[in-house]
Amino acid sequence: MATCSSQLVRGFVPFYFGVHPQSHLSKTGAPLISTATATSAKRGSRPMRIQSAFDMLSDSSASMKQWDGSEEAQFVDWFRQAWPYIKGHRGSTFVLVISAEIMDTPHLDPILQDISLLHGLGIKFVIVPGTWVQIDNILHQKGTQGKYVGPYRITDKDSLEAAKVAAGSVRLTIEAKLSPGPPMLNLRRHGDNSRWHDLGVAVASGNFLAAKRRGVVEGVDFGATGLVKKINVESIRERLDRDCIVIVSNLGYSSSGEILNCNTYEVATATALALQAEKLICIIDGEICDENNHQIRFMTLQDADMLIRKRAGQSPTAATYVNKRSYSARFQNGVGFDNGNGLWTGGEQGFAIGGEERQSRLNGYFSELTAAAFVCQGGVQRVQLIDGRRGGALLLELFTRDGVGTMVASDMYEGTRTATEGDIAGIKLLLKPLEDSGALVRRTDEELVDSIGNYVVVERDGSLIACAALFPFIADKCAEVAAFAVSPECRGNGQGDKLLDFVEKKAASLGLERLFLLTTRALDWFERRGFSECSIESLPEQKRKRINRSRGSKCYMKMLLPDRGGITVNGRSFDNSSL
């Protein structure tokens, strides 16, 4: 279904481009065209051949006509499931860093194809491409090699010239492959529309990055290596508002007119912080795995921070992170401040990764995970690290519930944990108004003590703001959700959704297939979240014997998606392999 999802979303985008009244128009209503604009070749094509991003749809049109009813139903079902993601992401700003390891591979073409597609759905993209591999290759061809100290390159004269060539080549490649729109063949049956001839993707680049020399550090002269001084937020946002995809190069410009070679991840993280982006997405060439080589699908910022601190003795990147946590990166109008007094004091404003630790992969992709945690600390709520070698990974990460990459989140599940006996008083306060109104069955202190290990609570500033209970029926591969309550002052901001999502993931990690609940008042709320009414007879026999049928409660059930990867929440890993 995941592979099918990425193909289906590409299938409908040409029609969205053609019928959406504002999808590719400027504020004045004029089509946006650029000579430096572009999209990628179709998936699997040779990297030297530039094609339309949607050529593959023309190739598959004949087979689509032969779909049987089940395939048509699958398309309709997926499209309806994707709508909340399409609506939720529209208008968001994503900073996307493409690692240098991906840039010269056939994987770049389908990634750019999907970026073009997502741009057509209303997502604003700022792309920061990596170049260290390309720079080192150019130096190698000249008989020299790159030199690094820590995460930074020593940029001598030859390295700076190589950096200019690499940055220009990468930028032109991206621009060239982002310009074509969807093929006309897919649109003609819907009538003639002049707007369909002007569906190219506008791409903008420029001097968005102000930098200063890194200088001489501990006796090492870094030459023309730069540090991020300012991100020109106003100029970037102006181009985003004109429906452009923006490319921010790692080459910065000093106040004296010098060209300086900056670290790609420092630029990307600083850009995400300065723009207050909804997401930083890192396209890398591998997966984030735990010590058992199982992919980590989710980490809270708290757990990522804890892991990084444990590694500080073995990883220079982790040690740098711990030192930089002494202040919190913040930007005001694109200028980084680390002391809050309005003066730039010279500290790095993003988070640089690179050098021997990253290139050798001795610590896997720990460097990228550390950069993700740093950005979350600075205020970007979501960072997603995606293996760019996987076909359609960007679409699968953004349009399916569990995604295929690793998410580090600063707010999701924040303060969520298993309850203890010390929480009983707080749980009773949450449940009492609902019990008094008859919405929930009243529970005794003894019942709460006996089942406290089944409760999950959300704590904020020392007080409980939400709770829920999960009672598994392992033999029946299902579980009951009960005692679901959110404090009145915290309702309406998604807290209930986060709690339910946590409970669902916990149930899936136990190998359960269904959730059920009994309710008298919250029917609509649970229906909107995928629960469907069912008969009481479909519940486990052990549960049916205890139901007070005089309450007239409605029974609802939801099928769970299988748990395909571990999640880490509050230091605890939920993973089938560990059960």
Image (spheres, helix red, strand yellow):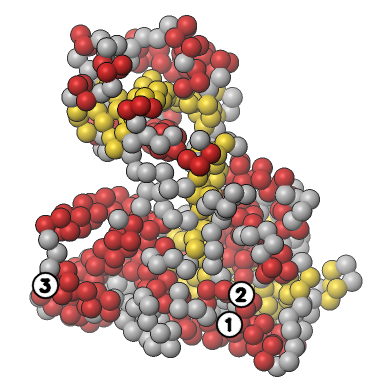
The quadrant where residue 334 appears: bottom right
Q: Secondary structure at mark 2?
A: loop
Residue picked out by circle 2: 250
10 Å crowding of disc 1: few (<14), some (14-19), many (20+): many
Most extreme residue toward the right is: 219
- Residue 210 horizontal/vertical position (percent): 64, 72
Query: Mark 1 and mark 2: span between their CA atoms?
Result: 7 Å
- Residue at 33% across, 12% down: 441
Which amino acid, mark 3? His
- Residue 303 horizontal/vertical position (percent): 61, 42
Q: State how many labels appear.
A: 3
The quadrant where residue 3 appears: bottom left
- Residue at 34% across, 78% down: 42
Going from N to C along the chain, the mark reached first, 1 or 3, is 1
Asked if the residues shown at circle 1 and circle 2 are in contact, with their CB atoms under 8 angstroms apart, the answer is yes
Which amino acid, mark 1? Ala
Going from N to C along the chain, the mark reached first, 1 or 2, is 1
Is residue 553 placed above or below 343 in the rendered structure?
A: above
Quadrant of the image for the N terminus?
A: bottom left
Give left or right: position of 192 versus 479: left
- Residue at 40% across, 12% down: 432
Q: Secondary structure at mark 1?
A: helix
Query: Mark 3 and mark 2: span between their CA atoms?
Result: 43 Å
The quadrant where residue 256 appears: bottom right
Q: In the rendered structure, find residue 190 and report the number of the disc placed on it.
A: 3
Give left or right: position of 19 versus 148: left
10 Å crowding of disc 3: few (<14), some (14-19), many (20+): few
Q: In the rendered structure, find residue 167 and report the number of the disc placed on it.
A: 1
10 Å crowding of disc 2: few (<14), some (14-19), many (20+): many
